[in-house]
Image: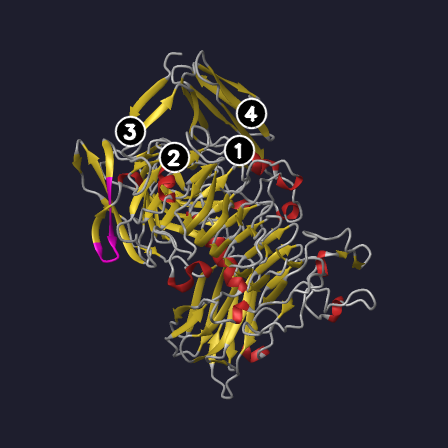
Amino acid sequence: MKRTLLILTLVFLSVKSMAQTVTFTGSGGWFETAFAKWEPVTGATSYNVYYTGGGQTNVKIDNQLIRSYGSYFRADVMGLAAGSYTLTVKPVISGAEAAGSTTGTLNVIAHDRSGFAFNGGRVPGAYQANGTPKENAVILYLTENNKNTVSLTVSGATTNPCVGLQTILDGYKKGKETKPLIIRMIGQVKTKGFSYLLGGDIVIENGITNTNTASSYITFEGVGEDATADGWGIRVKNAANIEIRNIGSINCSSSEGDNIGLQQNNAYVWVHNCDFFYGDAGGDADQAKGDGALDSKKSNYVTFSYNHFWDSGKCNLLGLSEGADPGYVTYHHNWYDHSDSRHPRVRYYSAHIYNNYYDGNSKYGAGSTLGSDLFMEANYFRNCKYPMLTSMQGSDVYNPSTGVNDYKNYPTFSEEDGGSIKAFNNYMVGQSRFVPYGDATYTVAGKIDATTDFDAYVVSSRSETVPASVLSRYGNNGYNNFDTNSAVMYQYTPDSPEVAKTKVEQYAGRLNGGDFKWTFNNAVDDVSYAVNAPLKAALTGYTTSLQAVQGETIVVPSAQTLVVTSGSLSQDVVTDEAIETTVLTWGGDATDATVTGLPANGITFVKNTTNKTITISGTPTASVSFSVSTTGSAGTSVAQTGTISLNAVNPTPVPSGDMVHNFTASGKTSGFYSITGSINSTNGSVTYDGLSLTSRLKMESSTSIDFTTTAVSTLVLVFDGDFVKRVKVDGVNYTASGGIVTVSNLAAGTHSITKGDTTNLFYIKTTYNTTTLGIDAVSKSSLAVYPNPVQDTLNINLQDAEIQQIQVYTLGGALVKSQKGNQSAIDMNGLSTGTYVVKVTSNQGVLTKLIIKK
């Protein structure tokens, strides 16, 4: 070995920017957090970041919150109260702070602190109700590099200072420390190399007493989008006042098997905004995806909210052997994304389960056993096989092939006595079966009675109680109506199921959905509960793109390296389109690199041994896969694989013709527009498009005109000739000129015209734009965009031309992003995964390019 260990002090050097100014590539606000990303600055050895807002000015953030991701830097400011903020980034060059740049206004929103965890005004964790740290809170930063050396002096600990994360938490276990503790995890922290875990878990304890109190408050949180617990679990026991948030859990291999588990004797625990991925397979058949994702046993006053479960096998077990003293748990705004079962499965407890999104669940949604009480409220069920099950009755024992109940062979999830489910205002579509109490549709004379074989008791109002006469078929357990008991229930404001679904898709999981992206195939994954092999492989091979944490010394072992320094290994292209040139660079202990699978199908490569690069280019004639691997006398070989997919995509046709409505000719009858309102009893007189228009619709508060378009269109509205005030289209005010309102580039979708100011409407015309971009508009050109596929920032290279505008369209022609000015990049954050068309307008014309957003 030429070397066994190399100690490098972090130095932040420029790779792009030639000016000593900061160029932002992205910024935003989130739950009690604001962030910014920027390009490296020439000569900068570090950066100082300041925030202004919340009544404070130019507050400098901790060094550890500033990180390098190679091509960009990022800072996350945490512990902010809701409000408006700006971030200022200043490079440090030759030991002096240079002039910086300031973001635009960033909107920071408050966490939703609802549920049983906040019973009696308690706020779990080391943050206050307004999102700022509690008084005297201690903040620790945990990274892959310091996981065994991070230290803290803890009151009552056997030895001080406590060194290593678990040792610090062991100190809090004594129950003597009163200082609130915030643990901020940065990047991917792996099981391998952890010197001290407890059965493969980090265990949080803080000396709870029999009055459900503890001396300290603890928050364990992730920083940014890529905080990942890789291989180890988080276990909470004998603890109170605990918060866990913004952490991704993958490949858990602990002895307990839970990604995050509340094991015993806990109270006032809040777990939220976490991503739950596959764990290592266990020994039982139902543990192929790992054991429980987020289980709770023998714990009281708990809230699980805004979590994202990615194809988990068993999501939420609640209760184990309890019975004498049931507890209270809330599940709200969680995304059960193609997960299989236990959403939750409940024994004994009273659980409020509201505003969750059940998205393609192959086994069942929520299940009630052993006298548990579930209030299922305003949840959204899409293709969930059995939305709600009560053990040993209803859909749980129904045999669809015979049409009767089979209590021996068909219990879906349990053979235990049943509990009770109260259901209100849930939306369901695509389920196999759901049996409301007493629904005659499901009664089969002499065989099935829906008053004993039902899934849930459906009420018409939230305040309605379940009668004492409604009992489970097995166990004769009734509903305790905890949700209408003011001495038990908390204050909350539920969303409608549709609004909840939208919120969940936007906010569940880590910040901005986390750095790991995956798109499920509903046609397959809605009904399959097998391990998704490509997803499993992606999780097993996951590596954060984090390069360095500011101020931290990095230990780099001897190794061979192979990195993509330009372009993308996997690309989708259309016929006759060249791929984006891709360059791989080898280094470290690697002395050479070899390519297998190329040249083939029009794709070739060039090796440059001086620069240590492999350059791949060409125009594919068919799809092709290839790999590149390193060799060397020291270190371990590294391999990279790629796939060029040739997609002959048919263009999306743009509808033709005008959708016209003339109130003079047709009154309120239309096949395209849905019109609600009153015709004015007095005629008017307007001429438009050669037509003499007289009959007119009164634009009043009760008036609405709804319609749906399938591509980008232009809307024209003709009013009284002297009308120069406003009308609303999709809630936005448009001002008339000479009685005419024109709305250009109206996106495809559902639209509504309503009153802005009082007037009369004579005529409506919707015209589909003939210039709508589809696949057929994509042209080969000197325009280069990279990386493609893109995740964050899309770079634009247009030689010898000045860019005037960049626009991004869906394949259906909807404009989703637009940016004016001579700028060479556009932020693609916020767009869904899929294919888009980028249109670049320059001083030399208009060029377009097909890109993939991952």
Residue bearing the label numbered 3: 10
- Residue 564 in picture, x, y percent from top left: 44, 28
Residue bearing the label numbered 1: 540
- Residue 94 in picture, x, y percent from top left: 17, 31
Return the disc, 4 or 2, that comes first in the chain's sequence.
2
The one nearer the camera, 454 or 577, is 454
Return the disc, 4 or 3, that comes first in the chain's sequence.
3
Secondary structure under tag 4 reads strand
Return the disc, 3 or 1, that comes first in the chain's sequence.
3
Quarter occupied by residue 385? bottom right
Q: Quadrant of the N terminus?
A: top left
Look at discs 2 and 1 and give the one toward the viewer. 1
Question: Which residue is found at the position 59% from the left and 63% from the top?
Answer: 373
Residue bearing the label numbered 2: 546
The one nearer the camera, 18 or 577, is 18
- Residue 516 in picture, x, y percent from top left: 48, 41
User: Is 366 in the magenta?
Assistant: no
